[in-house]
């Protein structure tokens, strides 16, 4: 059965996610006309060279004019500015969506700018890598990954279904939840793990010179995985922590308590506690793999990320 096409789809921001979305839409013929805007002239030039858009305007307003669906693929902190720019251009029935890693704050920032004749349907594809920019994207990024859609209360069911259909067309599995619930779940599955990676790599870098160089030399296993995550885009992750503050602090509080319990077990030589804890966490990993949902683990995106860059486009 063929997927209904969006007549005119506008993507704002042609980085990892925007360019992956555009590539997937192109490859699967999900839009009649695909417009890709970016404020950075170098990015626009690259989008034209890569050839995955029909039009490449400089402004979000231009891209949104006459669009049936507009998807903001910019750092969470830019959502308000994009909505303010795009809002007055939205035609009756148009859908405004996004891909931000935080949903509550995005909803709050965008909603006031969406006219009553248009629909706001935020979403978050739970798939990505540590790379950024238009060259990092690839069409299969969303295949068999979750896309969480967080419609505001009273959202138009037809608009919600249109957005879900687009994501399913790109190979994603769509799940619906409230923005608040999304932010709590993602705080523990994605945001706190990234913070831990940023922290441990920072701690290692601060060690005395000889020790630090040995960390680099012998970095294997665990630490190496952390360095991949800790190389993720600073702007994007700064915004995630600024805009999902409460949920991250809640999960960080629980994390710290549990870490203290493990620290205590080590201090007092309590092997039983350590063994019981590690046995429990091993079972969690196994059940994730059995369900074919490694994507729910903090290292989601890893297989794609480990591909060399030239294999990713
Ligand atoms: N990187 C990842 O693994 C994932 C990221 N996300 C979310 O996707 C969004 C985009 O992330 P990436 O694609 O990784 O970022 P990116 O840094 O690769 O690309 C962002 C693009 O947006 C453009 N941009 C920024 N502000 C703009 C504005 N005001 N107007 C027009 N263009 C603007 C930038 O020039 C850049 O080309 C973020 O909200 C992030 O939370 C969601 C899932 C995974
Ligand atoms: O590269 C990784 O391991 C990721 O965790 C990618 C990622 C980053 C942010 C998201 O909101 C979703 C996925």
Image (cartoon, rainbow, N blue to C red):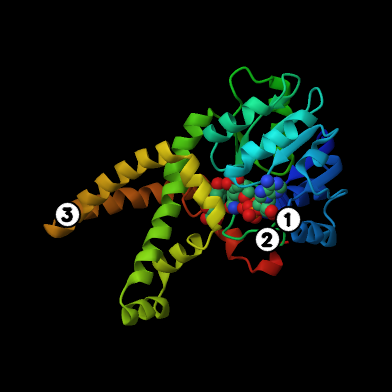
Q: Which one is closest to the eye, mark 2 or mark 1?
A: 1
What secondary structure is found at the residue carrying circle 3? helix
Classify residue 71 by image quadrant.
top right
Q: Position of residue 78 (x, y in %)?
A: 62, 43
Horizontal side, residue 135 vs residue 287: left or right: right
Name the residue located 40 percent from the left edge and 67 percent from the top edge: 223
Real-space Cα separation, disc 1 to disc 3, in angstroms: 52 Å
What secondary structure is found at the residue carrying circle 1? loop
Real-space Cα separation, disc 3 to disc 2, in angstroms: 43 Å
Q: Position of residue 109 (x, y in %)?
A: 59, 32
Q: Is mark 1 within 8 Å of ligand 1?
A: yes
The residue under label 1 is 40
Q: Is mark 2 within 8 Å of ligand 1?
A: yes
Q: Where the N terminus falls, by quadrant?
A: top right
The relative height of residue 242 versus residue 69 in the rendered view (above or below) is below
The residue under label 2 is 136
Name the residue located 71 percent from the left edge and 52 percent from the top edge: 20
């Amino acid at each position: 059965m063929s997927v209904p096409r969006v007549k005119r789809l506008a993507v704002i921001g042609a980085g990892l996610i925007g360019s992956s979305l555009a590539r997937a839409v192109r490859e699967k013929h999900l839009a009649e006309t695909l417009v890709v805007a970016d404020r950075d002239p170098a990015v626009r030039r690259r989008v034209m060279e890569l050839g995955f858009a029909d039009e490449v305007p400089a402004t979000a307003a231009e891209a949104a004019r006459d669009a049936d669906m507009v998807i903001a693929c910019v750092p969470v902190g830019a959502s308000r500015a994009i909505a303010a720019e795009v809002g007055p251009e939205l035609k009756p029935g148009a859908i405004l969506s996004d891909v931000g890693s935080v949903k509550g704050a995005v909803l709050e920032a965008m909603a006031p700018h969406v006219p009553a004749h248009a629909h706001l349907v935020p979403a978050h594809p739970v798939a990505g890598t540590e790379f950024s920019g238009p060259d990092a994207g690839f069409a299969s990024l969303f295949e068999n990954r979750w896309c969480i859609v967080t419609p505001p209360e009273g959202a138009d069911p037809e608009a919600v279904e249109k957005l879900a259909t687009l994501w399913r067309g790109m190979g994603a599995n769509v799940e619906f939840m409230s923005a608040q619930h999304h932010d709590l779940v993602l705080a523990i599955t994605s945001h706190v793990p990234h913070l831990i990676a940023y922290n441990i790599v920072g701690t290692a870098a601060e060690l005395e010179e000889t020790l630090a160089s040995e960390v680099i030399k012998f970095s294997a296993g665990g630490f190496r995985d952390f360095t991949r995550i800790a190389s993720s885009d600073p702007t994007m992750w700064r915004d995630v922590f600024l805009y999902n503050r409460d949920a991250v602090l809640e999960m960080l509080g629980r994390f710290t308590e549990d870490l203290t319990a493990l620290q205590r077990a080590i201090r007092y030589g309590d092997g039983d506690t350590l063994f019981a804890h590690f046995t429990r966490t091993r079972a969690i990993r196994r059940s994730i793999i059995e369900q074919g949902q490694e994507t729910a683990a903090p290292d989601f995106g890893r297989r794609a990320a480990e591909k060399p860059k030239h294999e990713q486009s």
